Image (cartoon, rainbow, N blue to C red):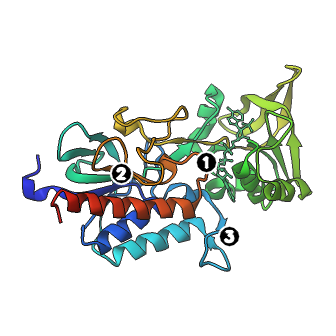
Amino acid sequence: MSAVNDVEKVVIIGSGPAAWTAAIYAARANLNPLVFEGALSSANEMIPGGQLMFTTEVENYPGFPEGIDGPKMMDEFRKQALRFDVRIKQENIDKLDLSSRPFRLTGSEGGDATAHAVIIATGASANWLGLDSEKHFRMGGLGVTACATCDGAFPRFRDKPVAVIGGGDSAMEEALFMTKFASKVHIIHRRDKLRASKIMQQRALDHPKVQVEWNSVPLEVLGDDKAGVTGLKLKDTQTSETRELPVSGMFLAIGHTPNTAFLGGQLPTDEKGYLKLADPYRSTTEIDGAFAAGDVVDSVYRQAITAAGMGCKAAIDAERWLGDQGIE
Ligand code: NDP
C-alpha cells in the first residue's frame, strides 16, 4: 500500500496519441505524470503504441507533409513526452479501483500505484471472427493475423493469394498493403456494399491484384500445421452455398473492441462497449477524477488527430480538477 506521499497526482493508462498527448500536457503542467504504457508482450492485445503500430503511412496528421509511418509517429510522440517530467512503466493495468480515493491501480508486473486522478486512454483492440480454426492458425505464424503491417512481409505470403476480411477502411488499407507482396488479394465482405470511404474503396477496387468476394463470410480456415493456412471455406450470405478459396493467409480487419475490461464495469459504456463521457465536450466521466480520451471513448472518428485532441483535453481537465481539490 502506498503512503500518502506516494500518491500520484495523475496516472495515464495507454500509449497511443491520446495517452502521449495527455502525458505531454500533464508534464508541462507540473503534474509529473506516470504512464502505464502496456506490457511489450501482452496477452490482452493492448499493444504499446496503440493502433498506429499497425498502420503503414499516416498521411492525414497535420505537420507531416510527406506522411510518417505509424510506429515512427508513436515513437516521436513518446520521445516528446520524455523531454518533460514523465515516468513510464511498461506494464498493463489489470485493475483500476475507482470505488475509493485515492484510486488504486494494479499493474500486470507488480507496479501497483495509487492516484488522485487517472486518464484512461487504453484504446481499442482488433476483433476476431471467433472460429476455432482461426484461433489455431493464429499461433506460430501459421497465416492468420489482424496486422498486415506487422506480418504481411513474411515469406509465406510472397507471390501467393491472401484474403483480407472486412469492408471498412482498415480492410482497404490492409488489402492495398498486401498487394506489395501477394499475387492476389481477395477482400471477403459479408455484404454487397463496402463500408469504407469512397477514396479508399476506389484505390482498392482499382488495383489489378484486388478482387472482392461479395456476400461472403469465412466458415473455416483450412490448412495444416506444416503448411499453415492453405485456404478458406466461405459461405455465401445470400444463398448459404459454400466454396473453398485457396489462400496462404487471412488478415482480419473487422473492427475493434475498446479496452475496458480492467474497469470491471465501474464506468458506463455505450452498446458497443465504448466508455461514455459525462460531458461529450470534455473528458470527464461519471466519477470525479477519472478522465477518458481516445479510441476507448470514440467509435465515430477514431483518428490519431482526434485522439490527440482528446488527450490534451483530458490533461487540462485533470489539471483543473486537481487544482480544485487543492492538489497542485
Ligand atoms: P469498421 O467498423 O469501419 O469496419 C469493419 C468492417 O468489418 C465492416 O465492413 C463490417 O461489415 C466488417 N465486419 C465486422 N464484423 C464482422 C464479422 N463478424 N464478420 C465479417 N465482417 C465483419 O472498422 P475499420 O477498422 O475498418 O475502421 C474503423 C474506423 O477507422 C473508421 O472510422 C475508419 O474510417 C477509420 N480508419 C481510417 C483509415 C484511414 O483513413 N486511412 C484507415 C483505417 C481505419 P459491415 O460493413 O457489414 O458492418
Q: Is residue 36 visible?
A: yes
The residue lying at 35 percent from left, 33 percent from top is: 264
The amino acid on which the numbered mark 3 sits, given as a three-letter code, is: Glu
Of the pair 284 and 18, the residue shown nearer to us: 284
Answer with the quadrant where ligand 1 appears in the image.
top right
Side of 209 relative to 251 (left or right)? right
Q: Are marks 2 and 1 in contact (CB under 8 Å)?
A: no
* Distance between the alpha carbons at the discs numbered 2 and 3: 29 Å
Q: Which quarter of the image is occupied by the C terminus?
A: bottom left
The residue wearing badge 3 is 59
The residue wearing badge 2 is 291
Asked which secondary structure carries label 3, the reply is loop
Point out the tag, 2 or 1, that comes first from the N-terminus. Answer: 2
Classed neighbour count for the residue bearing mark 1: other residues with Cα under 10 Å, few (<14), some (14–19), many (≥20): few
Point out the tag, 3 or 1, that comes first from the N-terminus. Answer: 3
* Distance between the alpha carbons at the discs numbered 2 and 1: 19 Å
The amino acid on which the numbered mark 2 sits, given as a three-letter code, is: Phe
- The spot of residue 209 in percent (x, y) is 88, 55
